Image (cartoon, helix red, strand yellow):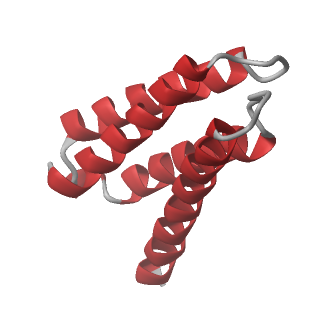
Amino acid sequence: MNDLILQILRFLHFVGLAMLLGGLMVQLRALHRQVTGTVLWGGVLQLLSGVALFALLIADVDHLKLTVKAVLLLVVIGMALAYRRKDSPAVPFGVSILLTAVVTGIAVFW
């Protein structure tokens, strides 16, 4: 049963990543860039599923790695909240995409 829960949480974590990164990439081409709910909820889903995975695997994880990932993800979510209701310049979107890519790279290569 524990393996099924871990697989579901990993799936939700990947869905959150897809929502976050996909939502940001779509807005880069838009004339008036706005943070959509997809970006915000993707970040929240990724954060919550990551915390749940951490809670289940606490003995088998690198705490520094997960702390760095969580801080960077919180910065992305904070930027999404800051630019949620207004047109935004390309810089916050570029930074958000870069940070999301860094978080993904940390997960894969660290």
Name the spot of residue 31 as percent of width and height, x first.
77, 31
**Is residue 22 shown left or right of residue 14?**
right
The answer to whether any part of residue 58 appears in the image is yes
Observer-nearest of 11 and 101? 101
Q: Classify 18 as above or below 24.
A: below
At x 51%, y 59%, the residue is: 13
Observer-nearest of 68 and 33? 33
Q: Classify 89 as above or below 29.
A: above
Judged from this view, the residue extending furthest toward the left is 110
The answer to whether any part of residue 74 appears in the image is no
At x 40%, y 59%, the residue is: 56
**Is residue 72 shown left or right of residue 63?**
right
Name the spot of residue 68 as percent of width and height, x first.
29, 30
Name the spot of residue 9 as percent of width and height, x first.
51, 66
**Is residue 70 shown left or right of residue 49?**
left
| Count of number-bearing discs | 0
At x 50%, y 63%, the residue is: 14
Q: Classify 41 as above or below 90.
A: below
At x 65%, y 16%, the residue is: 89
Name the spot of residue 108 as percent of width and height, x first.
23, 57
Observer-nearest of 73 and 23? 23
Judged from this view, the residue extending furthest toward the right is 85
